[in-house]
Amino acid sequence: MQGKLRAPLALPQLSYPFASEISPHANEVDAQAFGWARQMNILDSAMTAQYSGLRVGRLAGRTSPRSERAGLQLLADWQLWLFAFDDAYCDESATGEDPELLARTVVDYLRIIEDPGQVPDDADPFMGALADLRDRLLAHASPMQWMRFVHSVTGYFLSQCWEAANRSRRTAPTLVEYLHMRRHSGAVPTCMALIDVAGGFVLPQEDFANPHVMSLAQQATNIACWANDILSYPKEVARSRSVHSLPPILSAQYGIDMPEALHRAGQMHDHAVRQYLEQETTARAHAGPQLHRYLDDLRFWMTGNLDWSLETRRYNSVDALDEVRPA
């Protein structure tokens, strides 16, 4: 799962038959998110400069373009917390290779979200920022919306410990194992759990838990994560200590070179999009207004993630662009 790019790689061209939108508040939300992160001390001056081209407000604004201003800010702040946490504790850090240390770390964060009102005396900046997010989310969310979020964040933390265990053993997961855990490690479900919170509506539990709707949410998550794996591959190879990503997993599973692995990842992505469209038609046939809105935002998550990935400097640094070209 390790290695450096030695020659330009052609990345598959990804696209969706959905419309793209962006919130008119995106740039304002972006500036405020970075102000919040500095205030919470999860970004120092060096990291602020490193993140200057992240455009997290545009990620929030593209994946949730019709959200209310306060809800959009909450979503962007959470996404910025995730990026900072990932870089500080996961694939680019020594902690991300020590499953025992990472498990102890995430237990402290689970205490924050599972025990509302509690902030340990020895809280680090990430814990303090998470407590702030928790309190703001509880002010906006219903109890059921809050529990959806807690459930998804627990899955995210578990997946980071799983990745750390793989790194510590220098072993690659099987394709089946990876495809299941990738939905959690990408943290997309934590953001999708905020769709109706940020949007100012409540998706009824009977709709959220409907097997057809849950399948669509999983498909949309797969599509977003696989697109990320494809587009972020040059960055991950250049910066990560060990790459957990679909292309190298396919390469190891089938004994194929990286150009072919990227091609197959693109084929998997495109097939999942076609499946999503077929399943969505059935789900929309008898959907009420809240479910229609939720399904609209699942589409925005796919298109918005792609549009943002092509404009953020997180995946489009000068170094990365030197190593990759479009197909």
Image: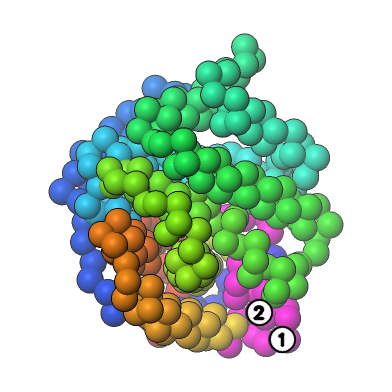
Image point (45%, 66%), residue name: 213
Q: Main secondary structure of the magenta part?
A: helix
Where residue 291 appears, as percent x and y from the top left, is 33, 61
Image point (64%, 28%), residue name: 111
Q: Amino acid at mark 1?
A: Tyr
Image point (65%, 61%), residue name: 181
Where residue 36 appears, as percent x and y from the top left, is 36, 28
**Label 1 secondary element:** helix
Task: Answer left or right for 63 relative to 66.
Answer: right
Image point (59%, 83%), residue name: 261
Residue 304 seen in render: no
Task: Answer left or right for 296 relative to 96.
Answer: left
Give the residue number, with chain letter if any, for mark 2. Answer: 250
**Residue 283 belongs to magenta span:** no
Q: Work out whether residue 141 or residue 183 is closer to the camera in this orientation and state it.
A: 141
The correct choice, above or below, for 84 with respect to 236 in the image is above
The residue segment tinted magenta is 238-260
Image color mode = rainbow
Q: Amino acid at mark 2?
A: Leu
Quarter that holds the N terminus: bottom right
The numbered mark at residue 254 is 1
The correct choice, above or below, for 269 with respect to 131 in the image is below
Quarter that holds the C terminus: bottom left
Tag 2–tag 1 contact (CB < 8 Å): yes
Task: Answer left or right for 95 relative to 120.
Answer: right
